[in-house]
Amino acid sequence: MQSWKKVGLLLIALFWFSSVPGFGQRDSTLFFKSALSVTQNGFSFIPSFSLGKPAIIFEPSIGNKRWSFEPQFRFALEGKPWSFIFIYKYRLVDKGKFSLQVGGHIPALIFSTQKVIRNGETEDVIVTQRFLAAELVPNYTLSKKVSIGMYLLRGHGFDKGGIQDSYYAGLRSSITNLNVSKRIFFKLNPQVYYLKTDDKDGVYLTNTLTLAMRNFPLSISNIVNKAIQTDIPGKAFDWNVSVIYSFDKNYVRR
């Protein structure tokens, strides 16, 4: 079976689960969140890829206990689109300390600028590459501050000249609410991951450090990414610093 059909079946399964009795339970509480980031070096959804220049990232999120829609919009600071990813997530299992979430990127769009000649003059045009992907995210909570989990992603590209097949497997942890003072705290999200793109692969280490203040919408985040062994083109070491504005509200349907 062709690889894109496998991805398609995974995405169909994502929607099928919502119709199974017990899986599609309704929750009267609806959340809406958003985060707007400005950074000197835009990082992709996969941290081994970066824009290499300043970027703006907008991440709205809406959903309930089971379902959520979490798109990501990335732009270069001058306004050119970089990537749009439309992510749908469904929480299959949420029992005690263990949770299991499935998701689909339907679709993911990557934009690049290419030069073409029209009427004897060189012009810049924006070219779009299209992808579909399915994700599986198991997570286990060790304590109020520490959790561990995996992030598994299978993607397929539809356009010639771009990546056709990609695999991502990450082992990650989340360490939160590490107090600096009564109001200021930080959190860590270290991860080791394996990435395969067509016939190239690599192993990487990455970490996100976030410094925040309780009941205050602004935070500062730092991402570092280090290649352990890879033949995928890109920087062996990369980093960024972002200023993030966050919004978070819950609504109860009556």
Image (spheres, grey):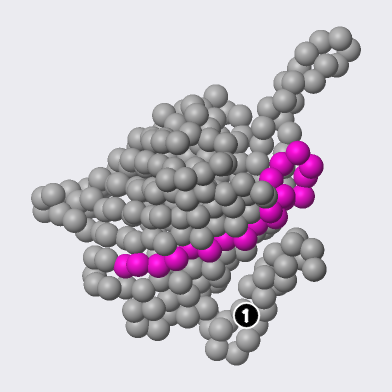
- Left or right? Give the position of 109 relative to 186: right
Q: Residues within 10 Å of mark 1 (few under 14, many from 20)?
A: some
* Residue 56 can be seen in this image: no
- Left or right? Give the position of 148 relative to 33: left
Q: Where does residue 62 sit, x and y in percent of width and height? A: 51, 61
- Left or right? Give the position of 239 relative to 104: left
Mark 1 lies on a secondary structure that is helix
Q: Please name the residue shown 62% across and 47% down the image.
A: 200
Q: Where does residue 217 sit, x and y in percent of width and height? A: 31, 46
| Residue found farthest to the left | 181
Residue range of the region highlighted in magenta in the rendering? 147-165
In depth, the one of 169 and 107 nearer the eye is 169
* Residue 182 can be seen in this image: yes
Compared to residue 51, the image places residue 96 above or below, namely: below
Q: Quadrant of the N terminus?
A: bottom right
Please tell me whether residue 161 belongs to the stretch shown in magenta: yes
- Left or right? Give the position of 211 relative to 6: left
Q: Where does residue 201 sit, x and y in percent of width and height? A: 57, 49
| Residue found farthest to the bottom | 21
Compared to residue 196, the image places residue 64 above or below, namely: below
Residue on which disc 1 sits: 17
Q: Which residue type does callout 1 highlight?
A: Phe
In depth, the one of 251 and 173 nearer the eye is 173
| Residue found farthest to the right | 119
Q: Please name the residue shown 41% across and 29% down the image.
A: 40
Classified by dominant secondary structure, the portion drawn in magenta counts as: strand
